[in-house]
Amino acid sequence: MSSTTRITVTLPSDQVAELRKITDNVSGYVAEAVARQIRHQLLGDDLRRHEEEHGHFSDEELTEAHAKIFGDGDSSKGADAA
């Protein structure tokens, strides 16, 4: 298990109420959400860096990526289907 640090986070009361309906482990739920957001941010940074070095992704590349992520075999939808 990785080390942890206790912090205080302020959230709107309505969010806390909904959160408590979803889970008894608020800390675990928030930690998972933060980890997901960090991965999302890092991926976005990597994609922007790739485009800066190699240019924008083509429609074909976007369609292929969409199919790999979502298992969509119908390439006629194009990149706008996401």
Image (cartoon, rainbow, N blue to C red):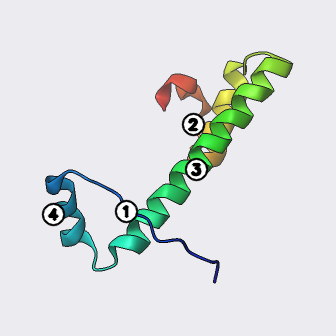
Q: Which residue is mark 2?
A: 74
Mark 1 or 3, which is nearer the eye?
1
The type of residue carrying mark 3 is Ile
Mark 1 or mark 4, which has the lower sequence index? 1
Mark 3 or mark 4, which has the lower sequence index? 4
Mark 2 or 4, which is nearer the eye?
4
Mark 3 or 2, which is nearer the eye?
3
Mark 2 residue crowding within 10 angstroms, few (<14) / some (14–19) / many (20+) = few
The type of residue carrying mark 1 is Thr
The type of residue carrying mark 4 is Ala
* 55 to 73, vertically: above or below: above
CA distance separating discs 1 and 3: 19 Å
Query: Where does the N terminus fall, quadrant-wise?
Result: bottom right
Q: Which residue is mark 3?
A: 38
Q: Secondary structure at mark 3?
A: helix
Mark 3 residue crowding within 10 angstroms, few (<14) / some (14–19) / many (20+) = few
Q: Which residue is mark 1?
A: 8
Q: Which residue is mark 4?
A: 17
